[in-house]
Image (cartoon, rainbow, N blue to C red):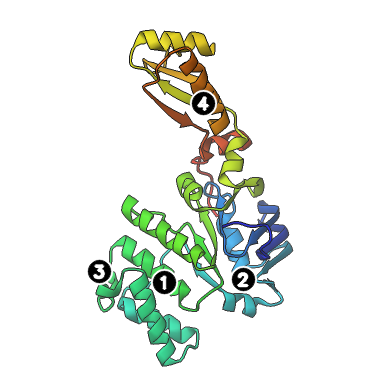
Amino acid sequence: MTTTLNPPAIAVTGLRRSYGSTVVLDGITLRVPEGTVFALLGPNGAGKTTMVQILSTLIRADAGEARVCGHDVVRAADRVRAAIGVTGQFSAVDRFLTGEENLLLMADLHHLDRAEGRRRTADLLDRFGLGGAARQGSATYSGGMRRRLDLAMGLIGDPRVIFLDEPTTGLDPRSRRDMWQIVRDLAGRGVTVFLTTQYLEEADRLADRIALLDRGRLVAEGTPAELKRRVPGGHVELRFADGRALAAAAAVLGVAPDPAGESLVLRVPGDGGVPALRLLLDRLDAAAVAVDGLAVRTPDLDDVFFAVTGRPAAEQVSAR
């Protein structure tokens, strides 16, 4: 659960990075509290992967400062690497090895002794539902299984912070939901998850806080609910059994039926909050108008992205 009392697991101030004349990150400042899921959302080319590469010490920023688990990513790069795990867009799984062998190899790279490496390998195989396929060649794994194994490999060192760079790209819906549950479980164990994604639903479901990145700049940041409240257009849909009830409700509420909308449904502007909803139903009840059903419709993150950038989040630009 997000709390402002938590110290930052990630702290970034004025981060800049360019490739030639192309500015990819333009003065980024953000804080990620420990034990939370933070989603960096944006289209291809917005700068998400560059941000992960800087925070995981793979490349250097041109300017600004970044600290992970209290360590400067340049001056204390080894300490940062010891505290993090990284799962990139493309699988790091060695297809010539079994799932178990991939994990044991990572344990060796983390300098774990043999007994501890085998213990962590067995635990991760079980936790990620790969125990039955542990000794099968990973080339036989499905896309979802390889993605789970890839993430397990990033966790073999028991990191405090895990970077997931578009972890569900190319997965089928079931595998994507499996990955979502893994992310929730990690956060539940106190791991800080820094997630980049193009999928609005993914960020909405998983993240404690979301930052919208567009053309190298942070254009909005907040909880999913806070971001959605920035966009007008929420309404309550009231469904009626017949046209007479619809007309009566429209007269009571002073709302005209939408001629292009669904028949027997009245759309009433509002945020769908409990007090407003209770007042709305009380007015209809006092006028003896029966409501057959209702639904609260609020803006989604696509609406938010469009509102702050003037274009949908799905729009693709040159990638990096």
Q: Nearer the viewer, mark 2 or mark 4?
A: 4
Q: Earlier in the sequence, mark 4 or mark 1?
A: 1
Instruction: Say which residue label 3 marks.
Output: 140
Q: Residue at x 56, y 27 (%)?
A: 276
Q: Nearer the viewer, residue 43 or 86?
A: 86
Taking 187 as reference, is 277 above or below it?
above
Question: Mark 2 highlights which residue?
Answer: 57
Q: Secondary structure at mark 2?
A: loop
The image's mark for residue 285 is none
**Type of amino acid at the residue the image marks with label 2:** Thr
Separation of disc 2 and disc 4 at Cα?
46 Å
Instruction: Tell me where residue 84 appears, x and y as whole percent.
Output: 56, 72
Q: Judge the density around disc 4: few (<14), some (14-19), many (≥20) Cα neighbours within 10 Å.
A: some
Residues at marks 3 and 4, CA–CA distance in whole angstroms: 49 Å
Image quarter (top left, top right, bottom left or bottom right) of the N terminus? bottom right
Mark 1 to mark 3 CA distance (whole Å): 17 Å
* Label annotation for residue 235: 4
User: Considering the image in quadrants, where does the C terminus appear?
Assistant: bottom right
First reached walking from the N terminus: tag 1 or tag 3: 3
Q: Quadrant of residue 134?
A: bottom left
Amino acid bearing label 3: Thr
Q: Residue at 43% across / 13% down in the picture? A: 288
- The residue positioned 40% from the left and 91% from the top of the image is 115
Q: Earlier in the sequence, mark 2 or mark 4?
A: 2
Instruction: Report the Cα–Cα distance between label 2 and label 3.
Output: 32 Å
Sequence order check, earlier mark of 3 and 4:
3
Q: Nearer the viewer, mark 4 or mark 1?
A: 4
